[in-house]
Amino acid sequence: MTRTLLWLIGGLLLGGIIHLATILTLPLLAEETTWTRVASLDAENRIVVLPPIAPGEPNPLRLDPELSYGICQLDLSQGPAYLSGVLPDAFWSVALFNQAGVVTYSTTNRDGIGQTVELGIFNAAQTRLLAQQQIDIAEGLLVVESRTDQLFVLVRLAAPHQAMRARFEAELSEISCGPREG
């Protein structure tokens, strides 16, 4: 009886270890990830407004069909990046994602920012230069430090009425994203 119980416990432990190892390694083996999907949108250093998601259609990024989305891919090894512009007078949010698709920073217009978004995105080395006043920034710029150089920005807009969606998406396309010129 004791021997059978030991074999059962050993089998459960071994099964648990194999199960955990499988779960932890499967994402590393995936050929299509959130990052590869974003990279295929040609959104490097510019906002790309995503087409509306129709009910029943494929939704690989798992986006809410009621919202409008703009996406921008950044590489901070090229220098600091900036997200700048005026968004419509309705709910909006901005989120930074790392290559694994994990949110590293997020804000909304309900944080007291208003409709103008002025976001400076820096890596750790650039933040040190900023602290030493070797990088000039505009007054009122919201400074965000990223742990990684490769990331993407997702801007979400909630139009109060479907008839306003096209105007909101046009305003979203005017947002600048990427390194500052000059």
Image (tube, helix red, strand yellow):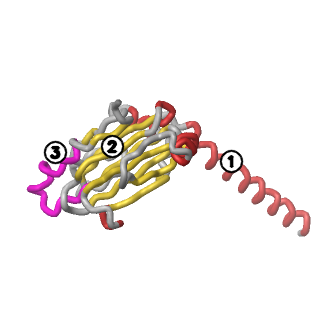
Q: Is residue 159 among what the camera can see?
A: yes
In the displayed structure, does residue 69 sit left or right of residue 82? left
Q: Tell me the distance, in whole angstroms, between the alpha carbons under discs 2 and 3.
A: 14 Å
Q: Tell me the distance, in whole angstroms, between the alpha carbons under discs 1 and 3.
A: 46 Å
Residue at point 51%, 40% (across, down): 134
Q: Which residue has dot 2 on it? A: 71
| Numbered label attached to residue 8 | none
Instruction: Pick the quarter of the image with the C terminus.
Output: top left
Q: Which residue has dot 1 on it? A: 21
Is residue 162 in the magenta section? Answer: yes
The magenta region covers: 157-173
Question: Dot 3 lies on which element?
Answer: helix
Determine whether 31 is above or below 138 in the image.
above
Q: Residue extending furthest right?
A: 2
Residue in front for this viewpoint, 63 or 17? 63
Q: Residue extending furthest front?
A: 133
Of tags 1 and 3, which is closer to the observer? 3
Identity, as a three-letter code, of the amino acid under mark 1? Ala
| Numbered label attached to residue 170 | 3
Q: Earlier in the sequence, mark 2 or mark 1?
A: 1
Residue at point 73%, 52% (across, down): 17
Residue in front for this viewpoint, 76 or 142? 142
Residue at point 17%, 51% (across, down): 168
Determine whether 11 is above or below 32 in the image.
below
- What is the chief secondary structure element of the magenta stretch? helix
Disc 2 crowd rating (10 Å Cα; few below 14, some 14-19, many 20+) is many
